[in-house]
Image (tube, grey):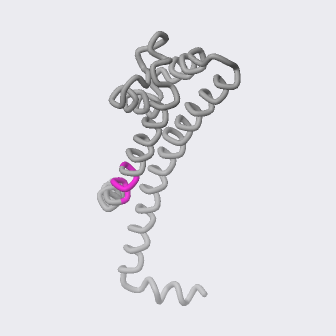
Amino acid sequence: PTSLHLLVSAVVATPAILNLIAYVCINGFAFAIAGRYIFDQDMNDFTRSNFRDLWQSCLTIFQLVTADEWTTIIYSAVASQPDSFSSLLAAVFIGIWFMLGNIVVFNLFVAVIIENFEIQRTLELIAAPGTVSRLSTLL
């Protein structure tokens, strides 16, 4: 029965997961546009993952979300900047997106699944006959 409950809670969580995916896409698009204006053509000589146009920016942002060679991207971003302050800002920009897109969003995804699993379990307990009367005798 546990697998069935987990499957039902995952199906019930579909609207929340779609909202989470929309949130990631909107933030990713915003970071892709920001990266396009911050780095422009500067990273072209260093790596294939760069911000030369909007499509390539979106691919680079997606690559950061999946953590695929994210260190190569951050090193290239730092190396493409002319001074140390700009290099620091480039590393902070990439680091913020990596943390927001990777760690926070994956934790939100897990939280949505767990919350819906708990809601399903609570609804089943409420629907079970005698649950409320047993609860009142415990109090």
Residue 84 location, x and y as percent? 70, 20
Secondary structure mostly seen in magenta is helix
Residue at 55% of width from left, 89% of height from top? 137
Relative depth, front residue between 129 and 118: 118
Q: The C terminus appears in which quarter of the rendering? A: bottom right
Q: Where is residue 101? Give x, y as percent.
A: 49, 40
Quadrant where the image shows the N terminus: bottom left
| Magenta stretch, residue numbers | 16-21
Q: Is residue 38 above or below residue 10?
A: above
State whether residue 109 is above or below residue 103. below
Q: Is residue 70 left or right of residue 15?
A: right
Q: Is residue 114 above or below residue 77?
A: below
Which residue appears at 36% of the width and 31% of the height? 54
Q: Position of residue 130 (x, y in %)?
A: 41, 86
The spot of residue 102 in percent (x, y) is 50, 38
> Does 111 appear above or below 106?
below
- Residue found at the very far right of the displayed protein: 84
Judge whether residue 91 is colored magenta. no
Between 111 and 104, the one lying in front of the other is 104
71 left or right of 120 in image = right
